[in-house]
Image (tube, rainbow, N blue to C red):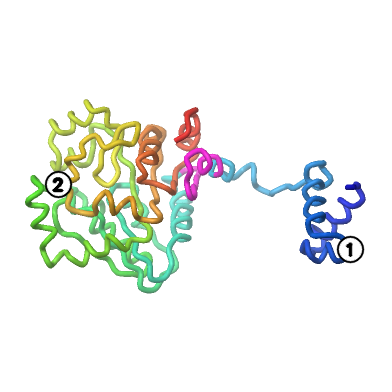
Amino acid sequence: MITKYDMIKVAHLYYNLGCNQQEIAEKMRTSRARVSRLLKSAIDEGVVQIHVDGYKDSCVELETLLEEKFGLQSARVVEQARSDTGTADILQFLDGFVEDGMTLGVTFGSTLARLAASSGLRPREHVRVVQLTGGLNYSELVYTPDEIAGRFARMFGGSAYNLYIPAIVSNHLLKDLIRQEEFHQKIFELYGQVDAAFFAVGTMLPIDILLRDGYINQELFDSFIEKRAIGNVCLRYFNQEGKLVDPELENRITGISLEEILRIPIRIGIAYGKYKADAIRAAIRAGFLNVLVTDVQTAHRLLEESDPV
């Protein structure tokens, strides 16, 4: 029989005095299982009311909802991702995934470039940062994949491994020749050893990076739209269901393969902006992301969809 006195006694010993359940069981001459039931009953019946200071002002609940809805390993939601505070919060979150001796993969985009331009993280030992895609002809140096890889390497006190070749070539034969080049073999070997990767999520806006810089032409881009492409990650364009709209493009992408991407244990997507919500959902469906970093508005938009991933 469970009495209110027993619940108060157990709660006092556990919460106020810091006794563990085994110690309480011995003190009260009962079983550990009964102590566990008493603690649960104390909460269920309101004898114990737990208040977490700052909970209502945090994004913890949003993060939990995202993790549960989309089956994510982890989620981090910040108030204003583009602010200095938001950038610092995102970097602190990413920092928690990095350990000595890890191999990290990075791609390209303004979001990653903004993070890579920051500093102040604790340096690690023997961290390798590998560029997952070939180069892009950005007009600004800060956005190039090799520059982003180099900056992340300096941030974590590691070494950068850059891939100085085009991101997409004209045909599969040229890709095969590049893959056979001895100069690039170290990079390709590292693709199978990546422990965690940082990805941006692109949308089908007219300012698409690959279209802007000539790696795909307008005709190909329009064909993606006709095939109902909704976004892209690491040069792969996918529809709302997370299916590639042009599987043949894989034969022309020179960097990490789709198969290698999906084998990376920690695949962190850093994407925010309500207009990206549909692309983020699809990227998760496709398996590109199992960790998500976003902002409050985007998180709410993601949770509006009734059907789970």
Residue found at the far top of this picture: 226
Residue type at mark 1 is: Arg
| Circle 1 SS class | loop
Front-most of residues 36 and 238: 36
Which residue range is magenta in the image?
64-80
Q: Which residue is mark 1?
A: 29
Left or right placement of residue 243 versus residue 308 in this view: left
Residue 74 colored in magenta in the image: yes
Residue type at mark 2 is: Arg
Residue 153 colored in magenta in the image: no
Left or right placement of residue 124 versus residue 183 in this view: right
Separation (CA) of disc 2 from disc 1: 71 Å
Q: Which residue is mark 2?
A: 252
Front-most of residues 198 and 86: 198
**Whole-percent x, y for residue 116 in the image:** 34, 57
Front-most of residues 297 and 47: 47
Left or right placement of residue 260 versus residue 35 in this view: left
Q: Is residue 192 above or below residue 202?
A: below
Name the image quarter holding the C terminus. Answer: top left
Of badges 2 and 1, the one in the foreground is 1
**Whole-percent x, y for residue 12 in the image:** 85, 57
**Whole-percent x, y for residue 14 in the image:** 80, 59
Q: Residue at x 16, y 64 (%)?
A: 184
| Circle 2 SS class | helix
Of mark 2 and mark 1, the one earlier in the sequence is: 1
